[in-house]
Image (cartoon, grey):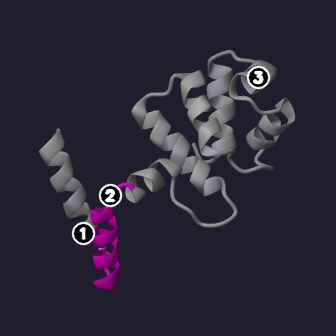
Amino acid sequence: MNSFGAFIKENRIKRQISLRAFSKKIGISPVYVSSIENGTRTAPSYDILLKICNTFLLSKTEQEVLFDLAAKSKNTPCIACDLTDYVNSHQLIYELLRTAKRYDACDDDWQNMIDSLSKKYQ
């Protein structure tokens, strides 16, 4: 899956939800949904994204894909909205990111952090 619109369209069709019914469930116009699916509009607000997750009954992993694709659809660089909320609620993440930036952390450094957390919580 390479675009937010394709993700939405594929999931909507897979669940056999018409464009009009889907737009009504999430609270935006059918024209807006069509524009998203065709890639001419970027992803909607976080609140609408949450409604999409609920309408499609997305797994946690599918939600992460949705949020990442939504961020990539924006015209300016940004991170996924679920990550923004998480970062904003944890001051130590700011410190970690500033430290990593200061020392220009390499991919191996980040992979070690990912592996360490994965090992701890799996």
Depth check, mark 3 against mark 2: the one in front is 2
In the rendered image, which residue does mark 1 sit on?
A: 108
Report how far apart the C-alphas of labels 2 and 1 lie in the structure: 23 Å
Depth check, mark 3 against mark 1: the one in front is 3
Circle 2 Cα neighbour tier, 10 Å, few/some/many (<14 / 14–19 / ≥20): few
Residue 1 highlighted magenta (yes or no): no
Q: Nearer the viewer, residue 119 or 10?
A: 119
Q: Residue 59 appears at what percent x and percent y?
A: 43, 28
Circle 1 Cα neighbour tier, 10 Å, few/some/many (<14 / 14–19 / ≥20): few
* Residue located at (70% from left, 22% from top): 25
Please state the extent of the stretch shown in magenta in the rendering.
89-104
Depth check, mark 2 against mark 1: the one in front is 2
In the rendered image, which residue does mark 2 sit on?
A: 90
Mark 3 lies on a secondary structure that is helix
* Residue located at (51% from left, 22% from top): 57
The earlier-in-sequence mark between 2 and 1 is 2
Q: Amino acid at mark 2?
A: His
**Does 62 sit left or right of 10 as displayed?**
left
Disc assigned to residue 24: 3
Where is 15 relative to 86, above or below?
above
Q: Residue 122 appears at what percent x and percent y?
A: 17, 38
The earlier-in-sequence mark between 3 and 1 is 3
The earlier-in-sequence mark between 3 and 2 is 3
Q: Amino acid at mark 3?
A: Lys
